[in-house]
Amino acid sequence: RDGDPLPRHRAPDRRGGESLADTLPNSPRRRPRSATAAEAAERGLHVWLQPTLADAPERDILEHMAECGRFAERLRRQGASVDFSVGCEFWLFVPGIVPGETVLDRVRNMLDGDFDPVRMQRRLDAFTAKAAALGRSVFRGRLSYAAAQDDKVDWRLFDVVGIDYYSYHRHHADYVRELRRYLRWGKPLAITEFGTCAYVGAPEAGGMAWNVVDYGKGE
C-alpha cells in the first residue's frame, strides 16, 4: 500500500505468551478508557483511540472528542504508539447532518431517501473539517477518521484514510481490487471496521447485516 505502513507490535498476553494482536482499538462512549489504553501501551501494543458519542448535542460530541484527543496526546508524549481518529461515520452518529433524532431514525431516513443529499454533504463536510481542526489542536500524532465505504471525505484533512469496510466478494482478489481505490490519496489505509453477523446470508448483506431485528415488536 502507499504511504508509511501503520505501526505493528507484538506484546505478551496476560498468560505470559505472545499475543497475536498488534493494535488495540479503543472507542470510549463517555470518557477515555485510560486504564485499558494505558495498559495496552505499556505492553507495546499500538493504540487506536476513537471517540464514539451518538445522539448527543454537537457541543458535547466535540468536547468528548477533545478530551479523548488530549488523553491520546498524553499517551503519545509518554512514548506510546498512538493514532487518534476523530470519530466514526458522522452522518450516522452526529444529529443534524441527516434528519432523525436517533441513529436508527437516521438510518431509516437514509434507506427511505428521506433526506437532501446536497444538504447532507455540505453539513458533513463542515462537521468533518471542524473535527479535523479540533483533533489537530489537541493531538500531534497521526490523525484519522472512520468513514463509511461510499462517504465523500476530504482526506487531505487526515494522515490516515479510515474505512468501515463491509463488502462481500466471492474471490479474495476482488477485495484487493476494491480497496486499491482508497490508496489514491497516497496515504496509509486503515480498515476501521469489518466483519459480519452470525447467520446464514449475513455476509452478502454487507454493512446492513445487523438490520434483521423487528424493532416494532419491542424484541
Image (cartoon, rainbow, N blue to C red):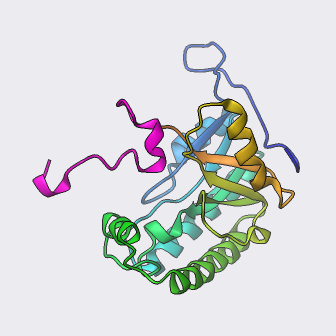
Which region shows up in magenta? 197-219
Q: Is the magenta region chiefly helix, strand or loop?
A: loop
- 132 inside magenta stretch: no
Q: Residue at x 24, y 47 (%)?
A: 213
In the picture as drawn, the residue positioned furthest to the front comes out as 170
Residue 81 visible in rendering: no
| Image location of residue 130, percent across then percent down | 63, 80
Q: Residue at x 47, y 37 (%)?
A: 203
Q: Residue at x 58, y 44 (%)?
A: 25
Above or below: residue 80 compared with residue 96: above
- 200 inside magenta stretch: yes
Above or below: residue 153 compared with residue 187: below
| Image location of residue 117, percent across then percent down | 51, 80
Q: In screen coordinates, is 80 left or right of 202? A: right
Residue 187 visible in rendering: yes
Q: Residue 54 or 191: which is nearer the viewer?
A: 191
Q: Residue 2 or 23: which is nearer the viewer?
A: 2
Q: Residue 175 or 192: which is nearer the viewer?
A: 175
| Image location of residue 208, percent across then percent down | 41, 50
